[in-house]
Amino acid sequence: MATAAPSAASRIAVVTGASSGIGAATARRLAEAGYRVVLTARRKDRIEALAEELTKAGHSAVAYQLDVTDRAAVDEFATAFKTVGVLVNNAGGALGADPVATGDPADWRTMYETNVIGTLNLTQALLPRLVASGDGVVVVVSSTAGHGTYEGGAGYVAAKHGAHVLAETLRLEIVGQPVRVIEIAPGMVKTEEFALTRFGGDTEKAEKVYQGVAEPLTADDVAETITWAATRPSHVNVDLLVLRPRAQASNTKVHRES
């Protein structure tokens, strides 16, 4: 069943971390659903290329270079809007896979700043605009790491637990306002950069993450899910949707073919 086009007051969708992976795929899906997409990321060239691609395809898209951890820049960004219909807090990522005993505090701090404080910054700055739209949606892209731990993942797990709690608490605090709070928690997603970034560019380590897994999730699988959840009728809130490939039963149990 086709979804209804967004209303005029709510048709702006802001996507963070839109330069690649889930963010870029989500921008494409929301544009196809009729939203005016605002692409944000630190890599200006990437989001400008995506905005051009979407515009040539007949969609409305604009690129805005932004570091979600820079609160002054986020506040300035927010002044460009009177209303916003959808905010997709996607910017995040993992660094390292060291045990707690030897984990790098700088990596932990970076992950927390991006995954949690970045989400907080955008949500606080744009919440009045989401309310003003009369039909706002805050999407927090967390992870199955936000719902269960695994060895070597404590820094990322802690950050994603923080993102999960932020979404859960915000939903309680703004009940009665015309804004829905949706958490999408993907499991194993194979994108061009996630594992490679996590392992500092080590291709061999990055490939081992997906070794033997016939069909991990794709960025578009997650993007389609985000768009579906955001475009439900206004009275329908998808509080939490956990998304995994069939081969992944949990964060620590994955079927791998020899």
Image (cartoon, helix red, strand yellow):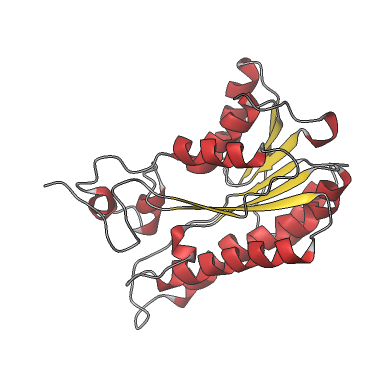
* Residue furthest to the bottom: 101
Number of callouts: 0
Q: Is residue 233 above or below residue 36?
A: below
Quadrant occupied by the N terminus:
top right
Q: Residue pushed farthest left?
A: 258
Residue 217 on image: x %, y %: 38, 42
The answer to which image quadrant residue 26 occupies is top right
Q: Is residue 46 above or below residue 154?
A: above
Question: Which one is nearer the viewer's eye here, 217 or 75?
Answer: 217
Residue 38 rendering spot, x and y as whole percentages = 70, 36
128 with respect to 33 (left or right): right
Give residue 67's position: percent from left, percent from top: 64, 53
Determine if residue 147 is in view: yes
Q: Provide residue 102's location: percent of width, then percent of height.
A: 34, 80
Q: Which one is nearer the viewer's eye here, 235 or 45? A: 235
Q: Quadrant of residue 28?
A: top right
The answer to whether residue 134 is left or right of residue 215 is right
Residue at coordinates 69% horizontally, 68% vertically from top-left? 169
Residue shown at the point (80%, 54%) measured from the top left: 127
Question: Quick check: 40 left or right of 204?
Answer: right
Task: Give whichever of 43, 29 is nearer the camera.
Answer: 29
Can residue 19 be seen by looking at this rendering? no
Q: Residue at x 84, y 47 (%)?
A: 129
Q: Is residue 227 left or right of residue 190?
A: right
Residue at image location 71% in from the left, 26% down from the top: 4
